[in-house]
Image (cartoon, rainbow, N blue to C red):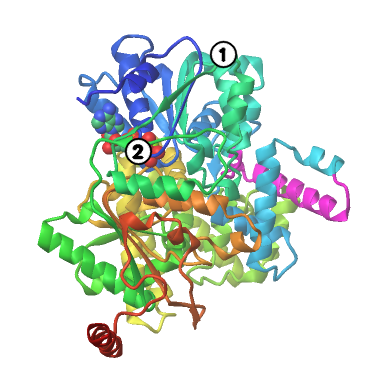
């Protein structure tokens, strides 16, 4: 067991008033939460089933749960809740179906499906940017707790009114589908808990709350927290204002100062010893973040010694950079026996992964890209998930719409449009409408038969899922996909064999994931929720595997690696061009700070002189943040734009030397 320092101990054993632990990176904030849960249970202050810890990601939740279980005697952590705000919200909604105004069998629409729903409400041919903008606008209403009617009432011009009407239509559709989207997972429970009866019930159930990464909570999450803890404020929140990097997604760092205002008896503990990084890495982090205004100074120190110099590498372009990083990692692995899993390559934007992946693959380095968007974007995954939803619930309209004609089975857009209007007119689901003899009588014989074949298929497989073990849903799903010849149909449209291979692998991954989840949940509906709430199968399958991690800076929050490569530190990328244009680079600086502070012993930062974006190569300047690193702790070969010394340089040097000697 580790020895907590006095401040950590004070934070762990503080009870009786709300507590905020405000401290820099690597100072043991997350550790304090883990230790505190164990302490609360061990000392009998609260039973595990009345404690909830809230983490920023599912992965962090899994890690924390494992940690706590290890700290306690076997089984002592049973019933403990460790999850994200979204999962907690889901649990509240699921257990309060009437109060939420939804029916039993509620489903979660993932972001993609929700975007499809928005698209349907917009004029045909609406661009993706438009769809996402509307979706984000709807999210802002929900985050602020504004209902559609209120949004309409407060509309100041035509634009506002149009947005509010779209919002209302969107909400109507969602409730007709008996579904909620991600924003609802927070906003609805927050609203539910304003009912005193519901609130009392939940306060009794979750008597003590702990929140990690508090600086990135949204307005709605803060409301939910307030409702849950009440005036008593039985909670511990930990955070670091310098690591608030989700402002673009609605996170409100000012929630940190709100806490002090809303809970006058708030106790604050500061931690100053960093246990993660060597002195020079900390020095670099402190120097970069010093460029942001601060209300509260934090000084981090480390007992780990100064450590190695930091390295800044200048590369010609992204391929050169990726190769350099791959060689570095290979060198560390073979030369210094560094495990793959000790290494991470971090970057600002997802597109940077491509060049890196290619080089890692070519050098035979096992790696894992975490949190990339690609998996859920793949057509076969989205279709596959729709089939899965229909397996569990044939009444799922968005899923029905998506795959009724994939593979093609004679249910083209005109047949589906007729079905849609019949369903609208009769208030039935698409599935029930398709089964309706009155509807079938309206159709030509072929179309009617096509609908019958599809609905019969769904009935048959749904029946099997209802009778089988949860762990068998995976195999039944695979059988359904086989049965409809899905892959043959889809890959028949591809001309590249590589692509077909990838699709097959993706679907295999999906089946494997469903099977694994099946043995971990207690209902098929819960399985669907898990699929929607988690970022993808890689997310849980490779925890602890010995692989080099590739991820964005956003995804790296809270994690640590002995060796970190921070790639693409260029103006326009980090800081991002959009932030430069808007004159708002504080959040970018915090991202840089997050990146630097992930590293334990070794940090290599790189930038390219040119980078390909959208097929053209553009010149790049080194990031302004590189100039802020204290020069004495950084090795930067060829700094200040100087090329490597050339033969001409050497000649000039010799000439100068000669002149000196002769003079
Ligand atoms: N008292 C301690 N003694 C030894 N190691 C510690 C101690 N406290 C924390 N650590 C270790 O220091 C590292 C950083 O801790 P932790 O991840 O909890 O920091 P954090 O403040 O949550 O960082 P971040 O701000 O990046 O989320 C971890 O490896 C943790 O196990
Ligand atoms: Mg942490």
Main secondary structure type of the part rendered in magenta: helix
Name the residue that disc number 1 marks.
265
Residue 359 quadrant: bottom left
Question: Disc 2 on helix, strand or loop?
Answer: loop
Q: Is residue 73 left or right of residue 9?
A: left
Question: Disc 1 on helix, strand or loop?
Answer: loop
Comparing 208 with 398, the one in front is 208
Task: Give the quadrant of ligand 1.
Answer: top left
Comparing 395 with 554, the one in front is 554
Relative to 518, say whether 380 is above or below. below
Whichever of callouts 2 and 1 sits on the residue coming sooner in the sequence is 2
Relative to 627, say whether 214 is above or below. above
Residue at image point 61% right, 44% down: 250
- Quadrant assignment for the N terminus: top left
The x and y percentages for residue 609 are 43, 76
**In the rendered structure, which segment of residues is drawn in magenta?**
155-184
Residue at image point 17% right, 61% down: 332
Residue 26 - label: 2
* Crowdedness near tag 1: few (<14), some (14–19) or many (≥20) residues, C-alpha within 10 Å: some
Residue at image point 31% right, 40% down: 469
Comparing 417 with 518, the one in front is 518
Relative to 320, say whether 518 is above or below. above
- The answer to whether residue 211 is magenta is no
Q: Is residue 185 left or right of residue 591?
A: right
The x and y percentages for residue 249 are 58, 48
* Crowdedness near tag 2: few (<14), some (14–19) or many (≥20) residues, C-alpha within 10 Å: many
Residue 34 quadrant: top left
The x and y percentages for residue 372 are 42, 59
């Amino acid at each position: 067991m580790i020895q907590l320092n006095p401040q950590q101990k004070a934070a762990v054993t503080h009870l009786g008033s709300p507590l905020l632990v405000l401290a820099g990176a690597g100072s043991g904030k997350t550790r304090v939460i883990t230790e505190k849960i164990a302490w609360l249970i061990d000392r009998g202050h609260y039973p595990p089933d009345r404690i909830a810890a809230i983490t920023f990601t599912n992965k962090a939740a899994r890690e924390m749960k494992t940690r706590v279980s290890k700290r306690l005697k076997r089984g002592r952590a049973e019933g403990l809740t460790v999850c994200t705000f979204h999962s907690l919200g889901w649990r509240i909604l699921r257990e309060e179906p009437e109060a939420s105004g939804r029916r039993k069998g509620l489903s979660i629409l993932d972001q993609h499906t929700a975007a499809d729903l928005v698209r349907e409400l917009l004029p045909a041919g609406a661009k993706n940017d438009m769809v996402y903008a509307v979706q984000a606008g709807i999210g802002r209403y929900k985050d602020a707790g504004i209902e559609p009617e209120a949004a309409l009432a407060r509309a100041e011009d035509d634009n506002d009114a149009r947005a509010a009407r779209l919002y209302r239509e969107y909400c109507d559709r969602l409730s007709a589908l008996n579904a909620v989207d991600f924003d609802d997972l927070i906003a609805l429970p927050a609203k539910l808990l304003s009912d005193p009866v519901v609130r009392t019930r939940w306060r009794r159930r979750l008597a003590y709350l702990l929140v990690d990464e508090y600086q990135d909570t949204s307005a709605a999450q803060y409301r939910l927290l307030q409702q849950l803890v009440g005036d008593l404020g039985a909670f511990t929140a930990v955070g670091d204002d310098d690591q608030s990097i989700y402002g673009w997604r609605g996170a409100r760092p000012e929630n940190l100062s709100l806490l002090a205002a809303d809970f006058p008896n708030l106790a604050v503990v500061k931690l100053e010893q960093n246990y993660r990084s060597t002195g020079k890495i900390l020095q670099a982090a402190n120097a970069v973040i010093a460029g942001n205004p601060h209300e509260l100074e934090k000084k981090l120190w480390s007992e780990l010694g100064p450590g190695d110099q930091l390295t800044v590498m200048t590369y010609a372009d992204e391929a050169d950079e990726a190769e350099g990083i791959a060689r570095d990692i290979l060198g560390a692995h073979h030369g210094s026996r560094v495990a793959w899993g000790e290494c991470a390559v971090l970057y600002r934007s997802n597109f940077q992964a491509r060049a890196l992946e290619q080089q890692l693959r070519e050098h035979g380095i096992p790696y894992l890209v975490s949190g990339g968007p690609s998996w859920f974007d793949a057509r076969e995954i989205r279709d596959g998930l729709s089939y899965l939803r229909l397996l569990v619930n044939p009444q799922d309209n968005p899923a029905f719409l998506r795959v009724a004609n994939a593979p093609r089975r004679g249910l083209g857009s005109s047949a589906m449009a007729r079905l849609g209007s019949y369903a609208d007119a009769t208030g039935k689901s698409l599935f029930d409408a398709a089964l309706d003899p009155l509807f079938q009588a309206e159709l030509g014989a072929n179309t009617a038969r096509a609908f019958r074949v599809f609905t019969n298929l769904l009935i048959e497989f749904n029946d099997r899922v209802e009778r089988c073990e949860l762990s068998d849903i995976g195999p039944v799903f695979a059988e359904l996909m086989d049965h409809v010849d899905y892959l043959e149909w889809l890959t028949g449209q591809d001309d590249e064999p590589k692509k077909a291979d990838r699709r097959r692998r993706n679907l295999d991954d999906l089946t494997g994931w469903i099977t694994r989840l099946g043995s971990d949940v207690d209902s098929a509906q819960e399985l669907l929720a898990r699929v929607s709430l988690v970022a993808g199968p890689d997310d849980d399958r490779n925890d602890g595997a010995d692989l080099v991690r590739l991820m964005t800076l956003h995804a790296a929050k809270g994690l640590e690696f002995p060796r970190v490569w921070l790639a693409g530190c260029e103006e326009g990328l980090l800081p991002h061009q959009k932030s430069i244009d808007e004159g708002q680079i504080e959040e970018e600086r915090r991202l840089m700070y997050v990146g630097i502070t992930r590293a334990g012993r070794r940090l290599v930062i790189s930038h390219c002189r040119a980078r390909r974006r959208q097929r053209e190569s553009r010149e790049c300047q080194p990031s302004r943040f590189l100039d802020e690193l204290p020069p004495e702790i950084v090795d930067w070969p060829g700094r200040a734009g100087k090329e490597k010394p050339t033969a001409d340089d050497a000649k000039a040097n010799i000439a100068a030397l000669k002149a000196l000697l002769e003079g």
